[in-house]
Image: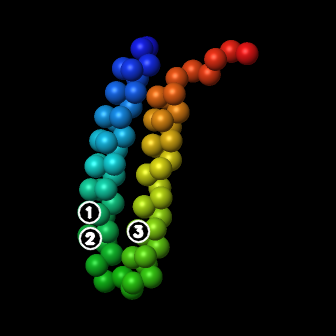
Amino acid sequence: MVPGLRSFIGTILIIVLVIVYALAATTFASLLLGTAPWWVHFLYFLLTGLLWVLPAMLIIKWMAGPKPRA
């Protein structure tokens, strides 16, 4: 695949990932954490704020393309 096309597709995928993930995490929090103490909110948003990085790393790795053979 052409590197420019791979980068474009990866960029679109990351944007979609961030939007969908943010909406899902916020919806889940508003439905289930309404009466939870502040520290549960803090831990939840700390965890979910970092967790989206894992699928984004996979997309970025794919965007970089295959490693050249030595």
Calculate the distance from the C-alpha at mark 3 to the C-alpha at mark 2. Answer: 12 Å
Crowding at mark 2 (Cα within 10 Å: few <14, some 14-19, many 20+): few
Crowding at mark 1 (Cα within 10 Å: few <14, some 14-19, many 20+): few
> Comparing marks 3 and 2, which lies closer to the viewer?
3
In terms of secondary structure, where does tag 1 sit?
helix
Left or right? Give the position of 61 relative to 67: left
**Mark 3 lies on residue:** 45
In terms of secondary structure, where does tag 2 sit?
helix
Residue type for callout 3:
Phe
Left or right? Give the position of 23 relative to 52: left
* Coordinates of residue 3 in the picture (x, y in percent): 44, 19
**Mark 2 lies on residue:** 30
* Coordinates of residue 43 in the picture (x, y in percent): 47, 73
Calculate the distance from the C-alpha at mark 2 to the C-alpha at mark 1. Answer: 5 Å
- The quarter of the rendered structure image containing the N terminus is top left
- The quarter of the rendered structure image containing the C terminus is top right
Instruction: Give 67 or 43, whichever is nearer the viewer.
Output: 67
Calculate the distance from the C-alpha at mark 1 to the C-alpha at mark 3. Answer: 12 Å
Verify CB contact (< 8 Å) between mark 2 and mark 1: yes
**Mark 1 lies on residue:** 27
Crowding at mark 3 (Cα within 10 Å: few <14, some 14-19, many 20+): some
Give the residue displayed 31% in from the left and 42% down from the top: 15
Verify CB contact (< 8 Å) between mark 1 and mark 3: no
